[in-house]
Image (cartoon, rainbow, N blue to C red):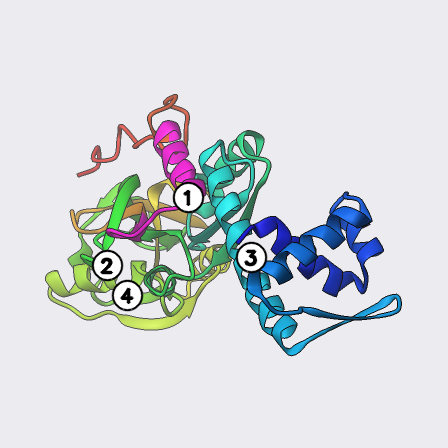
Amino acid sequence: MDLRTLRAFVEVVRQGGFSQAAKTVFATQSTISKAVRQLEEELGLPLLDRIGHRSNMTAAGQIVFRRAVAMLAERDDLIAELDELRGLKRGVLRLGLPAIGSHTLFAPMFTVYRSRYPGIDIRLVEQGSKRLEELVLDGELDLAASLLPVPAEFAWQEVRHEPLDLLVCADHPLSGRGRVALAELAAEPFILFGEGFALNPIILEACRRSGFQPAVVTRSSQIDFIIELVASGLGIGFLPRMIARQRHHDGVRHMAVADHGMDWHIALIWRKGSYLPHAARAWVDLAEEMRAGPASSPFRPDPGRFRHQ
């Protein structure tokens, strides 16, 4: 069965006649009529009941129309996937990014990616890391950024690895220190991130190793708000060093924490063993390219990352 004859039949039904169908597929009316007649002969059943200039589908025609639409859609999907292989001329990247650090790490990538692959539609989802992991496993995202370690169901590629810094208000007794032991913070009120943020368990587990459970006074998903709360003296907070250095505030001081488990280790993740679309693979490759680029790139590890430890 020739897909061209199916296409002709489908367009006759959709356009309401042979002449309009011919215009849609850029063919002559006689060509369309011949294609539909050929399809009817091949199937051995009339598909259209021709009454004057009108054509109504027969019962057989309704069945063929429904099946033909599905077959042509499959054909279009096949062509789209092959086009992807031919050079990412079109397609979709379903990408998930967390709120923390994405503006610094991934915003520069969007410009480069768009210039290379202008036909790719980037569908961005912003959530906490744990929710993004769920969306990747459910197949709703091709790729996401999350904090390591991740469950064994994921394959991953590192993006950035550096410590968390402590944030205190400017007049805090610890504000003049360059380094503090986590155990010294046992009596401090903690300001943590919103529910679903993967940094929370990292901080809480480090506290547990140091022998205490912190008192959490509030949580927020907004970095700037956390900084303002610290500046007001409500409590102490934590940020990846790269972000803490970028968010200068006269009322806040940041310092290293003497705990080797207090790390922000972010990676791109995808389902292990699954098909990674070429649009997503191109994003992973670009991330690795930028990570290995100039020392000024935000993807490059901080060479002084352990200098306070």
Q: Residue at the location (37% across, 65% down)?
A: 131
Q: Is residue 139 above or below residue 268?
A: below
Q: Are marks 4 and 3 in contact (CB under 8 Å)?
A: no
Where is mark 4, residue-wise? Answer: 188
Splitting the image into 4 quarters, where does residue 46 fall?
bottom right
Residue behind mark 2: 202
Height in image: 289 above or below 202?
above
Q: Earlier in the sequence, mark 4 or mark 3?
A: 3
Q: CA distance from mark 1 to mark 3?
A: 23 Å
Camera-nearest label, 4 or 1: 1
SS for dot 1:
helix
Task: Give the residue number, with chain letter if any, for mark 3.
Answer: 73
Residue at point 45%, 47% (across, down): 102
Task: State the residue lying farthest toward the right.
Answer: 52
Dot placed on the residue nearer the N-terminal end, 1 or 2 = 2
Q: Residue 9's x, y, as percent? A: 68, 59
